[in-house]
Amino acid sequence: MAFLIKSMIGNPLSGIGLGGGGDKEEEATPSDPAKAAGMTREEYEEYQKQLVEEKMERDADFLHKKAERATLRVCLREKYRLPKSEQDENMIEMAGDDVDVPEELLKMVDEDATEEEGKDSLMGQFQNIQNMDMDQLKEKASATVTELKSKAEEKCSVM
C-alpha cells in the first residue's frame, strides 16, 4: 500500500537534485539461484534433482492410492449392481494392472456384506425364527388367548 501511494505522489525532494539520490533500491539478490541458496552450483543441481525425484515418487504414490480407491469403488458398484464409471476404469488403466484393494478395506467390505446379507435375506429371517424357543412361543400365545377370553367373558354377558 505504501508503495502505491509513494509511486503516485512521489518524493517531493527527488526532483530537486540535491545529491540525495538514496531512494533507489538496488536488488540485493544475486542472479545465480545457487548463490542465493548458499550452495555451490553442483550442490544446487543435486538438490534440484532430488526435489524432482521426490516429487515423482509422491505423484506415483498418489496415483496408486487413487487407483486403489477406484478399484474399491468398482468392486462396490459390482456388488450393488450400480452403473460402471468410465473415470474409475481410466484411473485403474493409468496406474497399471498391479493395483489391488488394500486388505483392510477388503475385510471391512466383506464384513459389511456378510452382515447385510444375513439381515436382509429371507433365510436370515427364518434363522431368527429357528433360534426362538417354539415351546415358549406357543405357551405365550396360548396364555394370551386364554387371558383375552377371560377378559371378554367378564365384560360380555353373552359369552
Image (tube, rainbow, N blue to C red):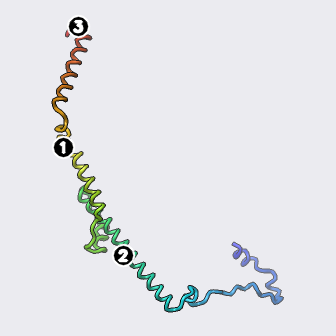
- Classify 67 as above or below 151: below
Q: Assign the N terminus to one quadrant of the image.
A: bottom right
Mark 1 crowd level (few <14, some 14–19, many ≥20, 10 Å Cα): few
**Residue under the image location 81 percent in, 83 percent down:** 13
Label 3, label 2: how far apart the Cα atoms are: 87 Å
**Residue under the image location 70 percent in, 75 percent down:** 4
Q: Which quadrant of the view contains residue 27? A: bottom right
Q: Are marks 1 and 3 in contact (CB under 8 Å)?
A: no
**Residue under the image location 42 percent in, 78 percent down:** 55
Of marks 1 and 2, which one's residue comes earlier in the chain?
A: 2
Horizontal relation, residue 47 to residue 91: left or right: right
Mark 3 crowd level (few <14, some 14–19, many ≥20, 10 Å Cα): few
The amino acid marked with disc number 1 is Leu
Where in the figure is residue 146, as x and y percent of width and height? 20, 18
Which residue is labeled 2 in the image?
Answer: 60
Horizontal relation, residue 153 to residue 33: left or right: left
**Residue under the image location 40 percent in, 75 percent down:** 58
Of marks 1 and 3, which one's residue comes earlier in the chain?
A: 1
Where in the figure is residue 123, as x and y percent of width and height? 17, 44
Name the outermost residue toward the top: 157
Q: Which mark is residue 122?
A: 1
Horizontal relation, residue 109 to residue 123: left or right: right
Mark 3 or mark 2, which is nearer to you? 2
Which residue is labeled 3 in the image?
Answer: 157
